[in-house]
Amino acid sequence: MICRVFCAAFVTLSLAFLAGADDKKDGPITPKDTIKLFNGKDLSGLYTWIKDTKREDPKKVFSVQDGVIRVAGMPMGYLATDKDYENYHLTVEFKWGKEVYGAKGVRNSGILLHGSGVDGGNGGTWMGSIECQLAQGCIGDLIPIGGKDAKGDRITTQFTSDSAAGEDKHLRWKKGGEAKVFAKGQQWWEKHQNFFKEEIDTRGKEDVDSPLGEWTKMECICDGKRITIKVNGKTVNECYDCNPSSGKILLQSEGFEIFFRNFELQPLKK
């Protein structure tokens, strides 16, 4: 009798444990060790979304060349992680390619954090997310991108950031500045040049990204509802009270050829 009671209790506890494990497995992943989002060989663990062809990529907008990810830039779309993540330290390096498709404005791309809802939920191109901007002169700017859920209802994307207006009246991150809620618009990085002219391959006076043709290291530290952005080791922007605060991680194709490498997550430091 005792054995039967013990065995029944053991089975019950085991099932409860497994149910908890499944619940955790189905939710966002918090890294305990380094997670390489790109294995250097192929796009395993990632999927493509192109505005015109959806999950199909017949033009090979996203490919692997010489151990790095090549993003053609056209058509528009993104490369997304299969899984959702939260509480992580993202590191990725990028450098610009040669193809600009005749554009005269600054080279443009981005890292989309906390991707949520359906693919193409924002105008058929992007997913609801918070963008870490990679455009020249604007690297480290933060942008809320709205999306839609599976029912077609709008996903509210927003964050709060300490801000101060520059000479051009545009808000920039300033630690200890006035708290501003961004549900649209753009929070410029700390030393975004006043009256910066967005012409291709121009640099701001205090830009900290690497020269054209060299690799720039980006770090996005997502700790709960807070995001801290670093460029080549320098903190340039920060926001908090982020909604959403977890989701997929996306690399944009936005009109310019760009390469990515060392795309990985580390656990947050305690």
Image: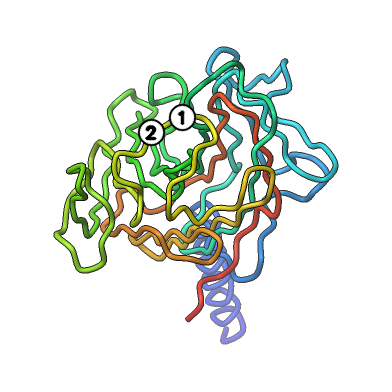
SS under mark 1: loop
Give coordinates of residue 268: x percent, y percent. 51, 72
**Tag 1: Cα neighbours inside 10 Å, few (<14), some, or many (≥20)?**
some
**Label 2 crowd bin: few (<14), some (14–19), many (20+), radius 10 Å:** few
Question: Residue at point 57% right, 64% down?
Answer: 18
Residue 229, percent across and down? 44, 58
Quarter-of-image position of residue 182: top left
Q: Residue furthest left?
A: 178
**Image spot of residue 54 (x, y percent):** 57, 19
Can you say whether 268 is above or below 133 in the image? below
Q: What residue is at 43 percent from the left and 55 percent from the top?
A: 206
The residue labelled by disc 1 is: 199
Q: Looking at this view, is 67 or 97 the one in front? A: 97
Q: Could you say which disc has been placed on residue 197 in the image?
A: 2
As rendered, which of 33 and 161 lies closer to the eye? 161
Name the residue type under label 1: Glu
